[in-house]
Amino acid sequence: MPSRLPIQDIFAGLVTSIGTAIRYWFHYTLVAFAWLGVVPLTACRIYKCLFTGSVSSLLTLPLDILSTENLLADCLQGCFVVTCTLCAFISLVWLREQIVHGGAPQWLEQNQQQPLNGVGQQNEAQAVVNGGVENAVLDQPANLAAENVVVGENPEIQEEQVDEEEDDNEDEEDAVVEDAADANNGAQDDMNWNALEWDRAAEELTWERMLGLDGSLVFLEHVFWVVSLNTLFILVFAFCPYHIGHFSIVGLGFEEYVQASHFEGLITTIVGYVLLAVTLIVCHGLAALVKFQRSRRLLGVCYIVVKVSLLVVVEIGVFPLICGWWLDICSLEMFDATLKDRELSFQSAPGTTMFLHWLVGMVYVFYFASFILLLREVLRPGVLWFLRNLNDPDFNPVQEMIHLPIYRHLRRFILSVIVFGSIVLLMLWLPIRIIKYLLPNFLPYNVMLYSDAPVSELSLELLLLQVVLPALLEQGHTRQWLKGLVRAWTVTAGYLLDLHSYLLGDQEENENNANQQPNNQHARNNNAIPVVGEGLHAAHQAILQQGGPVGFQPYRRPLKFPLRIFLLIVFMCITLLIASLICLTLPVFVFSVFVGRWLMSFWTGTAKIHELYTAACGLYVCWLSIRAVTVLVAWMPQGRRVIFQKVKEWSLMIMKTLIVAILLAGVVPLLLGLLFELVIVAPLRVPLDQTPLFYPWQDWALGVLHAKIIAAVTLMGPQWWLKTVIEQVYANGIRNIDLHFIIRKLAAPVISVLLLSLCVPYIIASGVVPLLGVTAEMQNLVQRRIYPFLLMVVVLMGILSFQVRQFKRLYEHIKNDKYLVGQRLVNYERKSGKQGTSTTPPQSSQE
């Protein structure tokens, strides 16, 4: 091998590498064009063609697909259509798995030993009621058992079903014989199954092979199937329901009302799905009358799909939207707004308005559910029997959507709307009315959407999101305080109304119950009747039919129990009203607003600021004060010496933390934001004949965001010195903070680099360039463009260094391909290491 490769070898290897790169570039371009161009564009054009409502659009569909008008917009819309169709397909597959493993509803499986199953379930329900009489109060467990039964919903309905099935026993036996014959035919088909053919047909399919990233052209077939699947789903799940709803709305004369809602397509499609569900259930009943078993089952499964889809839309879309609008309507006086203002905002931007109200409603529902979970940790198991336990491992909302009838879901929906709406009235509308009557000048709050201050609203919002909220949400003390308040209120209400046993339970009875529970459980398991069914559905039935609610604890029932429960509800409403008044006025909100306004006045002067920022700032100060007081109270029993020692340790730690915060959360974000302003923002926004203005607070707020992004990217990237230092700082935490290590290893290097990046270009532009005797225009040009110019130089140097490394790798690759004969494993010897390395040819040994 020569000491240096000949030029012709390097040129030949370079040409080969370029040819390979060009081939891969063409292939990946074809893949990107197919998946990001053909598939979404075809989906969008077919979608528009189907919904134009004219026959000529169908005839000109091939030409419309090849049209070059509005390519980018159609591709983006097509991506959304493809995403919806893929989500619908995945949802259908998942729903099928739920039906297969969880079991179909009872009305869909009426031919599989239904009389026996109905009698068994009736006996089990009777056993549940009888067992509830012995263990606890009669009313509550019986109601709960009747409420929680998934399949056997009502004994009277079960008796009617049993009578009807006994009358039609002969016909059902014939249907069972037919099903058995079909099963035998299916078994014969299974015997003809050839594993080799299936293995050959079902080749291992990976994401690379499916998308075409493995270099093959098999993905073109997948593109065809995806386009066909999109067309089928658009036709079945969008075109047909929309036109069914459209014809129905036009026939009923509601077209004007639907058009006035600004969501004509969505409402029309939902109406079409509702009518389709009614049609399916009617056809299912007719197929059951004429004994068409396969058609009956197919129509039933289609009805389940439509039913679950509509229930998901109602639970996730409609209910939070109702809550959001009700919250807005009840809080209009707090912000000095009217319904006319909300109507104008809806007319100007209907989509944005509906989304914001839905988002507010989702937040309200989420925090309400979180509060219910906190109540379950305090109250006796069984008190909240009428609310579903989200932490229950056996709770499966999809199975409930499949099995429970539609009137049960409608009843739950109406009850949820009443409960959530009443709480909003009690805790928002009524306190606002009281505040308006007692403190006329306190409301409304300033909620302007713009600011006349020199400080940008963006900096305040970033400060709120990056500093205040993480500090409040990452601490668990707020939840502990709320849980302590709920426990104190529960104990007080229990002793006042003699409901301590009902609300919190009795310890002695709980211990006796814990001792007796294994024996009772063993007896129930021995006497249980086998449930007909398989999989998750059978498990649910076995759990629900074991006698009483899961986790139910007995309690002592005092005299005049209904009256005491009514007084408890009244006491709870009064407490919620008082708590809402306290949160909206004294001491939290008034103190937080006044403290926040006082603190924000140092920042913004006399300019008006959104009350959200003043309230957030004041709440943060209040939270810090309350936290300090609670810590001091916790230290009081330990003595004066321990308190002084703790105060000394915490003071030292606070001083270290303040120094680190000033450096890492003050200086570094300020320098980083100023550098970003000089490099990117000012050259793009300010012309050369104008002078850029810099706002330090805004630059600092943007620098905080940039610093967090850089830290996150660094922690996700490869191992290097900055990542090692940041990980070490995170591992030490605040209690074990090492000030010397942070300053020497993190703060000093980062601040030095940022200061050099800011000062060196300024010195060159303001100190060196004027000495060269250039004109004033040239000096201004250099001063304004030197920062992006140096950034471009740094990027080019990085690209050149990367290309040099790539060329070295290519050089070694060409040398190995031409001259490398083989590789050999050589033992390493320390004494003769230098001699061995000098005699061994390059790249000839590899461990």
Image (cartoon, rainbow, N blue to C red):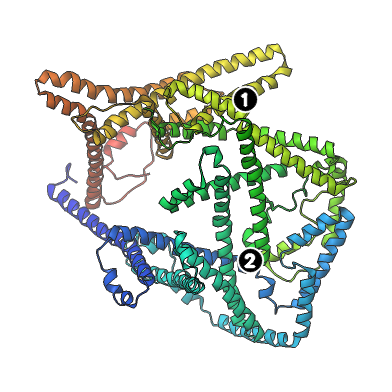
Q: Residue at x 51, y 78 (%)?
A: 194
Q: Residues within 10 Å of mark 2 (few under 14, many from 20)?
A: many
Residue 269, given in percent of the width and then of the height, sits at 48, 67
Q: Is residue 507 above or below residue 625?
A: below
Q: Residue at x 81, y 70 (%)?
A: 122
Viewer-closest of 444 and 79: 444
Q: Earlier in the sequence, mark 1 or mark 2?
A: 2
Viewer-closest of 665 and 208: 665
Q: Is residue 215 above or below residue 194?
A: above
- For residue 290, say whether it is visible: yes
Q: Is residue 734 left or right of residue 263?
A: right
Task: Report helix, strand or loop for mark 2.
Answer: helix
**The disc label shown at residue 362, or none:** none
Q: Residue at x 69, y 39 (%)?
A: 576
Task: Report helix, strand or loop for mark 1.
Answer: helix
Residue 625, given in percent of the width and then of the height, sits at 60, 22
* Quadrant of the image occupied by residue 424: top right
Amino acid beneath label 1: Arg
The C terminus sits in image quarter: top left
The residue that disc 1 covers is 627
Q: Is residue 189 above or below residue 596?
A: below
- For residue 745, say whether it is visible: no
* Quadrant of the image occupied by residue 131: bottom right
Disc 1 from disc 2: Cα separation: 48 Å
Amino acid beneath label 2: Ile
Q: Residue at x 12, y 23 (%)?
A: 776
**The disc label shown at residue 402, or none:** 2
Q: Is residue 682 left or right of residue 516?
A: left
Q: Residues within 10 Å of mark 1 (few under 14, many from 20)?
A: some
Viewer-closest of 468 and 407: 407
Residue 836, given in percent of the width and then of the height, sits at 31, 37
Residue 67, given in percent of the width and then of the height, sits at 25, 67
